[in-house]
């Protein structure tokens, strides 16, 4: 099963997600000359996204980033369905990681999971070398938020930094497991001023020692 590309123009929700500890995992597998499990793992994840794209919520699987994806959702996406999609993606990741990757690792990664950054804004489609591409501030912010999940000492696994706009429009009524107000300094965003956002925990139980900021 392969996923389908969806052309999006105008306002869209941008979800950036990455594998935690990806550099350590790749190094571990490379040292043992056994990188095939990682290829298999990402292939299974791609098939899962294709299935969810058809069965759960419409989105464009815009770009594979090497250890994660940029997903684009239409502005009229239902917030409850979007949140459930993210939670189910985390649950799938837990099981597939244990099945496909963990048995091949010589060391247990310090952090296992995926982390997210989410924003909404105007996207401009364009074609480069025959490929559908997009430009827009929301892509930059989503990627910066995803990278900033690791700040402040809390585990990034199965959590998301979400812009206040996205939280208010899509998640406020969706009953996430746990959410707190936080601030981050995002590189080249708002001239370095603090960016107010929300941190969402997408899986239960979360660690009681997690720093809520």
Image: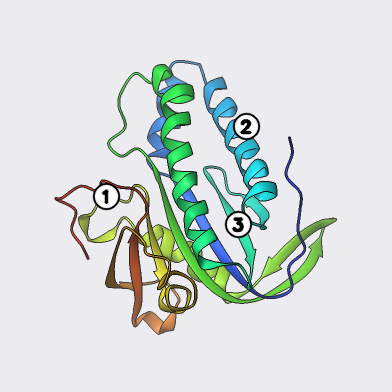
169 left or right, relative to 6: left
Q: CA distance from mark 2 to mark 3?
A: 16 Å
User: Which residue is more in the foreground, 190 or 71?
Assistant: 71
- Which residue is painted at 14% across and 50% down in the image? 209
Q: CA distance from mark 2 to mark 1?
A: 26 Å
User: Which residue is more in the foreground, 86 or 150?
Assistant: 86
What crowding class fits label 2: few (fewer than 14 Cα within 10 Å), some (14-19), or many (20 or more)? Answer: few
Q: Quadrant of the N terminus?
A: top right
Ranked by sequence position, the earlier of labels 2 and 1 is: 2
191 left or right, relative to 74: left
**To which residue does mark 2 refer?**
43
* Residue 88 x, y percent position in the rendering: 48, 46
**To which residue does mark 1 refer?**
155
Say if mark 2 contacts mark 1, CB within 8 Å: no
Q: Secondary structure at mark 2?
A: helix
The disc placed on residue 45 is none
**To which residue does mark 3 refer?**
71
Q: Secondary structure at mark 3?
A: strand
* Residue 90 x, y percent position in the rendering: 44, 44
Q: CA distance from mark 3 to mark 1?
A: 23 Å
- Which residue is painted at 25% across and 48% down in the image? 206
Quarter of the image where one finds residue 112? top left
Q: Secondary structure at mark 1?
A: loop
- Which residue is painted at 63% across and 62% down in the image? 72
Number of residue marks: 3
């Amino acid at each position: 099963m392969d996923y389908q590309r969806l052309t999006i123009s105008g306002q869209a929700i941008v979800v950036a997600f990455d594998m935690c500890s990806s550099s350590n995992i790749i190094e571990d597998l490379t040292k043992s000359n056994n990188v095939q499990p990682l290829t298999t793992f990402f292939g299974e994840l791609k098939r899962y996204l294709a299935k969810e794209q058809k069965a759960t919520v419409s989105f464009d699987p815009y770009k594979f980033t090497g250890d994660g994806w940029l997903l684009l959702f239409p502005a009229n996406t239902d917030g409850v369905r979007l949140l459930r999609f993210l939670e189910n993606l985390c649950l799938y990741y837990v099981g597939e990681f244990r099945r496909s990757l963990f048995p091949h690792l010589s060391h247990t990664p310090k952090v296992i999971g995926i982390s997210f950054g989410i924003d909404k804004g105007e996207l401009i489609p364009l074609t480069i070398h025959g490929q559908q591409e997009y430009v827009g501030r929301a892509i930059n912010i989503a990627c910066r938020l995803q990278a900033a999940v690791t700040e402040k000492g809390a585990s990034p696994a199965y959590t998301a930094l979400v812009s206040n706009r996205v939280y208010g429009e899509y998640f406020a009524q969706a009953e996430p497991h746990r959410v707190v107000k936080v601030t981050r300094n995002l590189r080249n965003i708002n001239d370095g001023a603090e960016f107010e956002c929300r941190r969402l925990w997408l899986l239960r139980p979360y660690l009681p020692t997690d720093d809520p900021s």
